[in-house]
Image (cartoon, grey):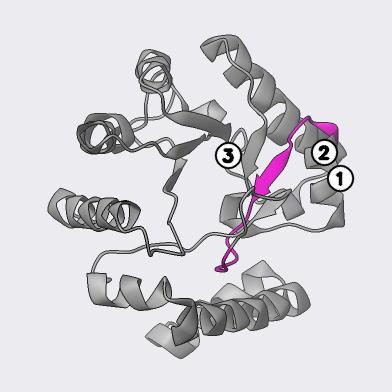
């Protein structure tokens, strides 16, 4: 989203924190470690005295164009922002074998800790994908909390699995206010929709689900019959 829209969201979140009657306070998270996190988001957050969680794809840091380097990430952490892991290469963890899971989970955590000189005990799941094997792998790799893509309310203190809602450009403050109002039921409906889609992904597989989704929503037919295999 544009910086101006992001700034309006942050101003609204600050208003909520000043309102003693507010029951739901949003937390802010970023995935991947894009350069705009350092170049834009950090300044906007610091200006308002806000902190966020930045989940970093360790193998992209200092290696992939457009993403933060280690000096920038260290400066972001030194400014009081929280840092967690987002895998090594952003591979969907449900697609990994045992050795790949070690790389995506343990190698990513150890690398971040070595480069930043701080403990890393939170993990954001790439694509929101997980199963029992992935969750066990996260526990074995030393993560105390796993952040998902399930849109839902969370109680404080946060538990071992934390849901989140992805905010996109064009989502108005009025819409966000309704989402944060438990009585509106909007977030609960989004959670039900998410779980239906997740069940479809598990039943069909990621590739077939994406093919059907693209066909239904954008009229993008498979390139060949083999595309549905």
Q: Which mark is residue 86?
A: 3
Neighbor class of circle 3 (other Cα within 10 Å; few <14, some 14-19, many 20+) is many
Relative to residue 178, is residue 103 drawn left or right?
A: right
Q: Secondary structure at mark 2?
A: helix
Neighbor class of circle 1 (other Cα within 10 Å; few <14, some 14-19, many 20+) is few
Q: Are marks 2 and 1 in contact (CB under 8 Å)?
A: yes
Magenta stretch: give its range: 140-153
Report x, y in % for residue 130. 73, 57
Q: Secondary structure at mark 1?
A: helix
> In the rendered structure, does residue 148 fall within the stretch colored magenta?
yes
Report x, y in % for residue 183. 47, 84
Q: Which mark is residue 139?
A: 2
Residue at (75% x, 73% y) in the render: 202
Relative to residue 39, is residue 82 drawn left or right?
A: right
Please state which of residues 21 and 50 is positioned toward the viewer in this rendering.
21
Residue at (61% x, 16% y) in the render: 113
Q: Which mark is residue 136?
A: 1
* Mark closest to the chain's N terminus, 3 or 1: 3
Q: Secondary structure at mark 3?
A: loop
Report whether residue 20 is seen. Answer: yes
């Amino acid at each position: 989203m544009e910086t101006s829209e992001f700034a309006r969201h942050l101003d609204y979140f600050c208003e909520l924190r000043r309102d003693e009657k507010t029951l739901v306070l949003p937390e802010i998270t970023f995935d991947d470690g894009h350069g705009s996190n350092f170049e834009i988001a950090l300044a906007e957050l610091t200006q308002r005295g806000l902190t966020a969680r930045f989940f970093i794809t360790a193998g992209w840091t200092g290696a992939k164009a457009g993403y933060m380097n280690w000096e920038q990430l260290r400066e972001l952490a030194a400014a009081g922002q929280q840092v967690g892991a987002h895998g090594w290469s952003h591979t969907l963890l449900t697609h990994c074998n045992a050795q790949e899971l070690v790389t995506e989970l343990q190698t990513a955590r150890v690398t971040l800790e070595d480069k930043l000189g701080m403990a890393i005990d939170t993990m954001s799941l790439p694509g929101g994908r997980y199963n029992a094997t992935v969750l066990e792998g996260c526990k074995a790799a030393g993560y105390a909390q796993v952040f998902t893509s399930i849109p839902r309310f969370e109680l404080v203190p946060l538990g071992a699995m934390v849901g989140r809602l992805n905010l996109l450009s064009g989502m108005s403050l009025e819409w966000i206010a309704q989402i944060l109002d438990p009585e509106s039921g909007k977030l609960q409906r989004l959670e039900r929709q998410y779980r239906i889609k997740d069940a479809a992904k598990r039943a069909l597989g990621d590739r077939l689900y994406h093919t059907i989704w693209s066909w239904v929503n954008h009229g993008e037919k498979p390139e060949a019959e083999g595309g549905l295999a």
